[in-house]
């Protein structure tokens, strides 16, 4: 009987099956019915182990169960594109104002908006698409979430009804889940209508269990209209609360390595941002006079005006770091360490301490002298305590000398970055990209949020980020283009009191402008700055590098893959089509005036787009770039 009760309460069997199976054991029908009512009452009673609203039974359609479990899972915003088979879910939203549906014109930018909201708020959200045809539009942003470890839940129904699967029906794709499996932590299809709430819970639990990542769920379209009774369970009742402390033995080993090192370097990453461990990491860096750098990530994870900051890791390899040269120890705290070559970021000969909550990736490429599988806030606390026990007067004196050296390097580097304005083309029209960035940096709020999808655009010469309350950065780490406009809209939705500025390349913008409509509709006062050189400048230069700077295309100045002019695209006109005011700027004076108008528009809750004419750079560009003439049959 215990097993039957457990199956009933977890919705593995129906109420009818519960009674039928009890009767099969010899219990009368009347007695079985009485037991059923008693179990149901117990599950709903205030005296149950959880609080009255933590676990409750709900009766309604599958769509209503979906909505009820989203509320219990802490969801506030649903980002979706219209799907007729979800009609019963839309019905359920009418009487549930705590769930707000954000209609997105295209699933890709819609998913980017949801991801931006999750990254900026730290709160759960869901993306809904129409069957496989809508899902495929969102797959690029699912890839971004996978690479960036963003805990976003994706859902789409299976367009075929449960009893009609396999008949090549309208929009049916056999093996639909195989599309998402390689880039989700979990892909799951509910096998019965009664499993909808459980499937929703599982998706959010897995997505929000470190290391974070996207999940995908679906079920047959007829499940949303089926009526049944099932449990709705609050998220805190299924959340494993995985904040792990590191192995104490490894902490002691790491502390000893750090204290004995002469030329150590600290790499920081996004787990610091997610754990809000900035002050702890700063304390560790100051305690040991550690020069601090960062490999490619979504956020800026260390205050860049700090004297121990030595700049981003150029090219993603330690060998390219200007300071310290030839480090004798590397510690990574929370960086995913994306490897883009056969050469490991940290050479084998250098002892490496790796602190992350992602145990599966530690040791995949680089050997570790001290692997610290941990929540980085807890791990840094433990490491600070262990280091303090080893600090003798002689060690402290040596650390003070190193701190002075690092500060001197940082001061020189800051002076060199300021020399960007010595560019002889500084006042030109079309504008240098560096000049555009400089003007935006001078204009932007000191605690504003910069969303960056600007291709190969370098912004470190003008922006210094401080995640502790200064300027924040949201970077397009995963590189599936078209995320910028949606991400900026989602960030603004999550942080209504903050200025949000999007730095966007023209090529990236064309991949996903539809979220401008969401900015206008929801009155999200984002300032969008388009660096418009009418070309895919990054791919142009990288392709030439792959050719070694020579070849037929170079000799003939004929490049089929990168020029976006003839006709030139007017991004401000595109924006106006989506309800967003904007203008074009061709020189610094026009740009400053446009930024002033953007601030006034933003003050009224309106987004604004500035389409800036930017000069092309790199070998092979002619004054009048070649455009192929197609031969038509």
Image (cartoon, rainbow, N blue to C red):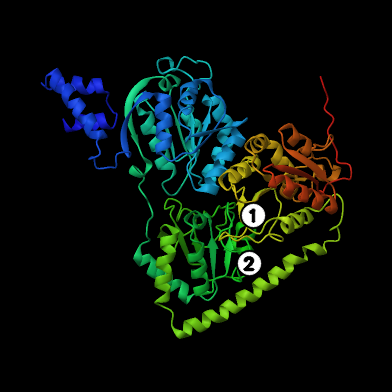
Residue 562 seen in the figure: no
The residue beneath circle 1 is 448
Classify residue 385 as left or right of residue 343: left
Residue appearing at x 19%, y 19% in the figure:
20
Mark sitting on residue 383: none
Mark nearest the camera among 1 and 2 is: 1
* Relative image position of residue 55 (x, y in whole percent): 31, 37
Q: How many marks?
A: 2
Q: Quadrant of residue 504?
A: top right
* Disc 2: CA contacts within 10 A as few (<14), some (14-19) or many (>=20): some
* Relative image position of residue 151 (x, y in whole percent): 48, 43
* Disc 1: CA contacts within 10 A as few (<14), some (14-19) or many (>=20): some
- The quadrant the C terminus occupies is top right
Residue appearing at x 41%, y 61% in the figure:
378
Classify residue 364 as left or right of residue 307: left
* Relative image position of residue 291 (x, y in whole percent): 57, 70
Classify residue 518 as left or right of residue 288: right
The residue beneath circle 2 is 305
Check disc 2 and report its element: helix, strand or loop.
loop
Q: Nearer the viewer, residue 315 or 479?
A: 479
Residue 404 seen in the figure: yes
Q: Which label's residue is closer to the chain start, 1 or 2?
A: 2
* Relative image position of residue 399 (x, y in whole percent): 52, 79
Q: Quadrant of residue 322?
A: bottom right
Q: Work out whether 39 lies above or below 529.
A: above
């Amino acid at each position: 009987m215990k097993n039957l009760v457990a199956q009933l309460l977890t919705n593995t069997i129906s109420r009818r099956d519960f009674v039928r199976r009890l009767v099969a054991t010899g219990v009368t029908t009347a007695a079985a019915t009485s037991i059923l009512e008693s179990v149901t009452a117990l599950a709903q009673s205030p005296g149950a182990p959880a609080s009255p609203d933590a676990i409750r039974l709900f009766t309604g359609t599958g769509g209503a169960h979906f909505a009820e479990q989203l509320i219990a899972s802490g969801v506030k915003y649903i980002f979706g594109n219209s799907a007729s088979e979800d009609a019963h879910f839309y019905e359920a939203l009418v009487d549930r104002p705590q769930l707000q549906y954000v209609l997105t014109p295209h699933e890709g930018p819609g998913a980017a908006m949801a991801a931006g909201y999750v990254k900026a708020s730290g709160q759960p959200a869901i993306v809904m698409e129409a069957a496989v045809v809508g899902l495929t539009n969102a797959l690029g942003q699912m890839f971004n979430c996978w690479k960036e470890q963003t805990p976003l839940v994706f859902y789409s129904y299976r367009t075929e009804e449960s009893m009609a699967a396999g008949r090549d029906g309208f929009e049916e794709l056999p093996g639909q889940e195989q599309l998402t499996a390689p880039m989700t932590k979990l892909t799951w299809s509910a096998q019965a209508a009664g499993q909808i709430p459980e499937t929703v819970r599982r998706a959010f639990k897995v997505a929000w269990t470190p290391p974070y990542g996207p999940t995908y769920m679906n079920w047959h379209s007829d499940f949303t209209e089926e009526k049944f009774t099932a449990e709705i369970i609050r998220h805190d009742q299924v959340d494993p609360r995985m904040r792990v402390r590191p192995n104490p033995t490894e902490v002691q080993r790491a502390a000893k390595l750090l204290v004995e090192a002469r030329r150590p370097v600290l790499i920081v990453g996004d787990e610091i941002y997610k754990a809000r461990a900035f002050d702890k990491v700063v304390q560790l860096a100051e305690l040991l006079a550690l020069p601090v750098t960062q490999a490619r990530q979504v956020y800026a994870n260390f205050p860049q005006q700090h004297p121990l900051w030595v700049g981003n890791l150029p090219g993603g390899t330690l060998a390219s770091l200007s300071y310290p040269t030839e480090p004798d120890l590397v510690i990574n705290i929370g960086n995913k360490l994306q490897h883009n070559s056969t050469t490991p970021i940290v050479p084998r000969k250098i002892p490496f301490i790796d602190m992350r909550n992602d145990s599966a990736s530690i040791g995949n490429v680089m050997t570790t002298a001290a692997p610290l599988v941990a929540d980085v806030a807890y791990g840094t606390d433990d490491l600070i305590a262990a280091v303090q026990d080893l600090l003798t007067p002689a060690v402290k004196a040596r650390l003070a000398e190193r701190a002075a050296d690092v500060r001197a390097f940082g001061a020189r580097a800051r002076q060199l970055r300021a020399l960007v304005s010595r560019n002889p083309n500084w006042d030109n029209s079309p504008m240098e990209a560096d000049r555009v960035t400089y003007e935006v940096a001078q204009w932007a709020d000191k605690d504003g949020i910069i969303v960056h999808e600007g291709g190969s655009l370098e912004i470190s010469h003008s922006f210094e980020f401080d995640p502790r309350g200064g300027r924040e950065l949201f970077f397009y780490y995963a590189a599936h283009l078209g995320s910028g406009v949606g991400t900026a809209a989602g960030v603004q939705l999550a942080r209504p009191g903050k200025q949000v500025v999007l730095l966007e390349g023209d090529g990236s913008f064309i991949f996903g402008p539809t979220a401008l409509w969401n900015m206008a509709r929801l009155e999200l006062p984002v300032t969008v700055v388009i660096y418009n050189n009418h070309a895919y400048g990054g791919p142009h230069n990288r392709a030439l590098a792959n050719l070694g700077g020579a070849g037929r295309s170079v000799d003939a100045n004929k490049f089929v893959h990168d020029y976006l002019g003839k006709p030139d695209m007017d991004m401000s006109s595109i924006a106006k089509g989506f309800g967003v005011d904007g203008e074009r700027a061709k020189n610094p004076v026009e740009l400053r005036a446009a930024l002033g108008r953007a601030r006034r528009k933003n003050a009224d809750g309106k987004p604004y787009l500035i389409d800036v004419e930017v000069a092309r750079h790199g070998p092979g560009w002619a004054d009048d770039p070649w455009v192929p003439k197609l031969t038509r049959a």
